[in-house]
Amino acid sequence: MLIAYPLVFAALLFCVGIYGVLSRRNAVVVLMSVELMLASVTVNLVTFNQLVAERSDVLLTGQVFALFVLAVGAAEVGVALAIILLLYRNRASVNIDDADLMKY
Amino acid sequence: MWFVRNAWLIPALPAVAAGLIFALGRRLPGRGALLGIGVIGLSFVVALGVAVQVFSANVEAVAQVEEAHGEVSAAEGGEEQHAVEDDQAVTESEEEAAIPEGVHSFLYDEGVDLTGTGADWSFQAGIRIDGLAAMMFLLVTFVSLMVQIYSTGYMHGDPRYTYFFGLLSLFTASMLLLVIANNIMLMLVGWELVGICSFLLIGFWWEEKVNSSASIKAFITTKLGDVGLVVGVITLWGMFRTFRIEAILEAVEAGEFSQSLLTFALIALFVGAIGKSAQFPLHTWLPDAMAGPTPVSALIHAATMVTAGVFMIARLYPAFEASPTALAVIAIIGAITLVMAGLLALVQDDVKRVLAYSTVSQLGYMVAALAFSYTAGIFHLFTHGFFKALLFLGSGSLIHAVHSNNMSDMGGLRKAMPTTFATFVVGSAALAALPPLAGFWSKDEVLAGALESGGYTGNLVWILGTLGGFLTAFYMTRVLWLVFGGEYRGHGEPHESPRSMAWPLIALAVPAFFIGFINLPFGFAHPVGFAAWTAFDLAYFEEQGAVFVVWLAALATVLALVAVALGTLLYRKAPAPDDDPMLNMGWATRVLDRKYYLDLLYSDAIVRTVIRTKLANASYWFNDHVLDRVVYLVGVGTARLGRATYEIGDQKGIDGGINGLGLSALWLGAKLRLAQSGNVQLYAGAMFAGITVLAVAFAVS
Amino acid sequence: MWENAAISLTVFLPLIGAGIIMLIPKRNEDAAKPVALLISLGGFLLALGILGSYYLVDRPAGDLAFEVNIAWIPAIGARYHVGIDGISLPLFALSYLLTFLCSVYAFHHIEEPGKPKAFLSLMLLLQTGMAGCFIAFDLILFFVFWELVLVPMYFMIGVWGGPRREYAAVKFFLYTLFGSVFMLVAFLALYFAAPEPTFDIQRLMAFGQEGAFSRTFQLAAFAGVGIGFAIKVPMWPFHTWLPDAHTEAPTIGSVLLAGVLLKMGTYGFVRIALPILPEGAVFWAPLIAVLAVIAIIYGALCCLAQTDLKRLIAFSSVGHMGFVMLGIATLTPVGINAAIFGMIAHGVITGMLFFVVGSVKDRYHTRAIAEIGGGLLQTLPRMGVVFTFVAIASLGLPGLAGFWGEVFALLAAFSPAESLAPWQTLYRVLMVFGAIGTVLTAGYFLWMLQRVNMGQAPERWKDEGLQDITVIEWGAWTPLLVMTLALGLLPLLVFGITDPDVTRILAAFGS
């Protein structure tokens, strides 16, 4: 199997995610972009597992990790949405530029 | 030997008394005075007992030596081998080999370790009783007893009466500790204790700044000398690894040491003596020390404190003898001191200052004498103690009567104060070395000793000493006339002092008159007199034969009489300061107007006196404007240096550096926090940039 | 039983006491004073018991008394190894005496803002730290106690201190911490460099004396340990935290700081730096000696410039600790004995001086010498007499405690250890300068007495009705005054205890 395809796909996906995180102001969109990056990493995990699948002791490790990442990602989204919700309640906006309490 | 074994009581009793007086204070009978006097009286009794036992033992030892001498000279014909007599104490000289085995001068040396280690640096609370110590006990306890009795009158009504007696007891105890010590460390302890007591006593009336300044000056000046003492003690320890005097002297005798190191140690010790015994150039504190109550001056000048330096040299005399350089230094310093101080005494108006300078001068005699003759030095110390105490107490009696220290406020007191007058005359005559009073015999011994030794220093000392004798007689005559002659110039009615003050004067006048006879410088008196009593080494004693140079004694006496006559001539009328020849530069003209009274010899003497007056004024000026100024400038300069060190070096330099470190961290933080924009995406961007850089670096490597 | 439990009981009693005091309800806060008094008295009596049984029980030379050695943190090989020998015993007992007297003094006065509960529990915590330092025979244990001391002292200065208290407290804390970083690194280095990794001081000492550490290592390790200790002493030029801390600290804080805390530094030199790293000691000793003598002269000069009474006393500590360091730097038994004597004497005398100055300030509400304006002997005669006595003791009068440490330190400098023979001349010159330092010391103390004690009191103080020494103050001070006299008259009280162990640890230097 040509391993380059999924890797290139993951890299593109990651770049889209980065672009979204850096350029968008809407917190929900930023969150979605983060999820894209997460997904790209998950793809990588599965891909690399295939690369080393000959070794019996790592038979399905990548896939198992991918499942873990999906679960953690779901939980993360829950927390993040809760934060965004609180932010919206307090500021009546989901623009992340408004959340600058940590600014000096 | 009960007294000798229990000689530790002599310093212990006054020390305990001092403690009791400080602790219980006014509740004691006589507000502490009775306790102090009673205890010092007891000490005096013990000291007498010790003296009798030690002196008789020494005389007996001398007698045995004499006897042996007789046998040896009788057996000179036969060739006798004295191989067995190769005692360790007996050294090479054949003459000394004549001292029979087992006969030595009295020495009792016992103590207990005070450090509890037994190491080579441990020292004892130990006593060393020999002729010298016994002599000092007698002097110190007797003078202190007289001073304390006297003080009950003099200090009557003072608010700190009790405290005064406590201090007197402590002062005496410290001096006695210094005397009794069997090791140089304990001696150092007594030495410094004496210093602090003098500080407290000189500044006794501390309400006046003059007094407290004088006390500080006294303490610091002597403490400066003490640096020498400490260095000397440590060097001696470093050379011989012991503090015990006996062990040090034995080691010196054995001769296993570095000569230059010994000379260094001894000169350092002598620097201590220069400070304590007010020798040139550290003598300036002594006249200022007159700020203390007069009984204190008497105690300081006669028995304690200033004699400590002389005593210390005498105590380590065999060591000093081993270093001719050190002895030469001692002789020269002593000679300079005795003349310089004598000149200074000429132009004083304050009666206590005249006496103070005379003390400095007499101390110069003692120190110079020690360069040639052990006996002469300590004999002069002994006699001087009595008559100087007498003079100071007498001056205190005068001050008590007229409420002023100045002779210009006195005059004509002979009738009003007969006892003081009579005793003061005795004291002055003794100080002026008129025969047959005490001072004559001791000063003659000093001069004759110097003459005998000859050499550069010997000649210097006897010539300057003779001149100094002339000065002494002159200024004491001046004092006598100014105080007792003429008309009363002060305020109020002067009256004789109470009995408590008069009796000590009489009790001191007796020894001031007669004490000289205990060391008549004639052959028959020698083996039973003072020299035998205080001999520390029989071989040495044998060498120090009786010295009496008739022409020198006659010369000194004639000079003294001339000085008395001259003084009488000039001061018979007890002139006021305006007319005082010593205080007026133009007096020579007026005296020359009355040339009837003066023949050629006198005018010659007067010319010389003019020079001397000028010289004295010049040296007094030097004293006040150069030496004292230097002390002052050093003090001010040190304070300035201190301020500069503190403000520039410490606060700005070192502390500034430390603070700078802290401030720079703050500054850096202020700059860095600007990066904290609060924009999440900026952070994320920075993070990605960083990761990219890392990834590239990783890929490349 | 007593042998095993004595030290732990004594050291941790104050810690327990601090806990008990914290439990006292806030509304009757004054109850903290008697409780603290009882606990510190208990600690003091236990310490006396240890002192007594140390005298009575014979033990083989070189053995520690009351030794306990059990595993503590096995992972890093740290052990709970405690014990007492002649070097630590006097300091150990002194710390208990001073804390006890401080808790007596607390009845008289605690600075603003009061709060006896907090203050006294901090004081007891401090006591555990101080005492622990002197009995720890494991480097990690030592370090823990060493750092434990910082915290209560920081709060004492920072909360109960004078106007510039925050500055002083932070400076004290940071400076000391800065030093202990080096110390800790050096401790770890020792652990790894030893033939068998260990933190045990006794075993490290044995390695050190056998020459198990290389010369280069010793030089570096000594420098590391030395900086930590030197800041605590404090040695010139690391002393600048001291005047600030002392000036601002409350009276009790100053007493304990001067009385015990400074000694932890010098004790560290004697207990750890010298015996474990003999070659390092020989290399650095001349430098230490030079710095010590600079401190003597320099401290005295700075004292001459002071206008603040408490700051003057603080600077005098610099000079006095200079004598202690000079004694240590000679590497001879006599020098180290003198140093330990000097530590005890300084603790007693300077502690007492801070008590008196604190009480004077408490009455006059100023520390400025010019404001007091002299005449203390008139306004407060008894206080004046005590002040004179202590000042004279501090300037090193023989017959009082201050003398022996100074004179024997100078004596030791005349002939330093054989391994320092190339530096002999330097040491002798230093001895002369040290002796001159005693004159300067006398000078500033007497000048201070003249300006504070003597002369006519200014009118405004005369009618103020200032109170002379109170009963409580007498109670807190009398033991120190008696000790000043007793140690001066009988130096064997300290030398007798210290000498055997000092000689033992110095075997490596040959003298």
Image (cartoon, helix red, strand yellow):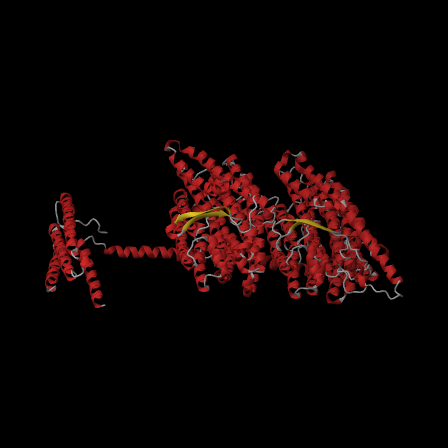
Percent x, y of residue B364: 71, 57
Give the percent coordinates (x, y) of residue B162.
Answer: 64, 38
Q: How many numbered marks, from 0 up? A: 0
* In the foreground, C503 or C56: C56
Q: Is residue B221 above or below residue B158?
A: below
The quarter of the picture where residue B72 lies is: bottom right
Q: Where does the image place residue C419, in percent across and percent down from the top left?
A: 54, 63
**Image location (x, y in percent) of residue B421:** 76, 45
Of B434 and C190, nearer the camera is C190
- Give the residue furthest to the front: A56
The answer to whether residue C443 of the structure is visible from this angle is no
Which residue of the protein is positioned furthest toward the top in this rendering? C28
Q: Is residue B18 visible?
A: yes
Residue visible at 23% across and 68% down in the picture: B701
Q: Is residue B246 left or right of residue A101?
A: right
User: In the figure, is residue C168 to the left or right of B216?
Assistant: left
Quadrant of the snapshot with the C terminus of chain C: bottom right
| Pick the front one: B454 or B497 | B454
Query: As displayed, is residue B162 above or below residue C495?
Result: above
